[in-house]
Amino acid sequence: MHRILIVDDEENMVAALDMLFQGQGFQTRTAAHAEEALALVRRGERFDVVLSDMKMPGTDGIEFLRRLHEEGVETPFVLLTAYGTIGKAVEAMKLGAVDVVTKPFDKEVLLSLVRRICRMESLKEENRFLKEAVDGDHDAFLYASERMRGVVSLLARAGPASTPVLLTGESGTGKEIAARMLHAFRAGDFDRKPFVSVNCPAMPENLLESELFGYRKGAFTGAVRDFPGRVGIADGGTLFFDEIGDLPLSLQPKLLRLLENKTYEPLGTASPRHVDIRVVCATNGDLRRLVREGRFREDLLYRVNAITIRIPALRERPEDIPVLADAFLARFSTELRKSVHAFSREALEMISSYPWPGNVRELRNVVERAVVLCAGETVFGGDLPAELREPSRAAEPGASRGGNVLEDMERRLLADALASSGGNVSEAARKLGITRNTIRYRMQKFGLQDGRNAPLGGG
């Protein structure tokens, strides 16, 4: 329940405000003057909003706000005045007042203002927790939208359990950050427990088993020491599989066993080892389609998606775009040692109206670029890439189908590699720096497997 401090020397006004906010479910405290209010603060009472009259005996509202800051109190402050002047309003805002409301005021307008302040303070507190709890690129999960608040609520409720979670969503939406949040929300001293990531498409198939499950010394040529594998390293914490759809079929039964029995066998051993582990998987594809195509085990699907949480694309939560852009601006200004403090109105409109096919990852890269190129303290439209400055680009092929520009680029690269390799799948995989299993998955995804769109040969 939010707490409101009402400070006014007019008894009737105090009584009216007290009745108004208590009737709407707020807790209230009242004070007849600034000194009485300061005494409450010094006793350690905390408030979500301070409503203060401007003209009071002794210390006026402006001086009261200044003294609150001297006490280290940064509670949102709203000044109420029947003597409002432009000069006083400007002075109050410079000191950090959220707003100045002139008496007589509309009670619904005042209620709406206070609710909005309380809502923003709750979001700040939630985002502060996320920044402290999540290692790495925590800025990528800041939010102001109800949609993302619902996602964070799901993560918080699923977090303490050891039940497997499947995170779905487009590339660049922040699925790994969501996985780290699940790890952070687990009960206990999470910062001392390991979070281990496995990037399935990036690992060659012939090395993935030993990297994942470990090995005993002498298990194969080059195994000069025991290695616990990523499963063993993650014992007590979280094991995150990025792009689980690219996990080779040969390893899927072993992952299923790990999920069902919490046991695994390193290469070169005959006895199973037990681990206390939480498995989180992520995909930007359709695992059910892979099951139908025989490239993903149905029983494994039912285990990894015990709880499924979809991370929405950035274009589906436009309220978050300015929040994220500001966070990245502050971050890169510090990292790059530049004094860039704001976006111009034009630049912010460009950023807010762009569909962001690359999601949060693309926004982060655009803001970093803008900070590098910015010549002053403000990012202008000219500091942004051409696709943001030319709205017509948002309607190019791909973006009109829900922001699939990256998929179009990936398809063209794949088709070009196959064509230049004479349809040899292994050669094309080497050119692209991916595994043969991964390239076949991408070929199926983009309809390049039947020879109609690109020549396929042996390999």
Image (cartoon, grey):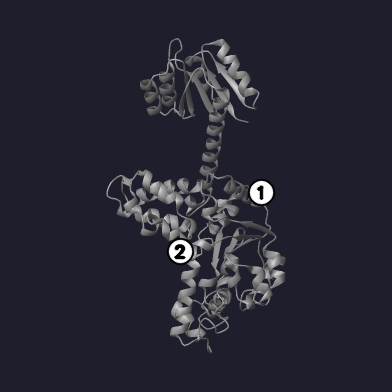
Q: Is residue 27 left or right of residue 439?
A: right
Asked whether 324 or 416 is in front, the reply is: 416
Q: In which quadrant of the rendered image does the N terminus lie? A: top right
> How many numbered callouts?
2
- From the image, tell me which residue sits under label 1: 157
- Asked whether disc 1 touches disc 2, contact meaning CB atoms under 8 Å apart, the reply is no
What percent of the width, then of the height, locates residue 158?
Answer: 66, 52
Q: Residue at x 70, y 60 (%)?
A: 306
Asked whether 276 or 346 is in front, the reply is: 346
User: Residue 248 falls in which quadrant of the image?
Assistant: bottom right
Looking at the picture, which amino acid does disc 2 mark?
A: Glu
Looking at the picture, which amino acid does disc 1 mark?
A: Arg
The local crowd at label 2, few if under 14, some if 14 to 19, many if 20 or more residues have their Cα within 10 Å, is few
User: Residue 215 falls in which quadrant of the image?
Assistant: bottom right
What percent of the width, then of the height, locates residue 154?
Answer: 64, 50
What percent of the width, then of the height, locates residue 293?
Answer: 66, 76
- From the image, tell me which residue sits under label 2: 396
Q: Is residue 110 above or below residue 104?
A: below
Marker disc for residue 331: none
Q: Is residue 339 left or right of residue 214?
A: left
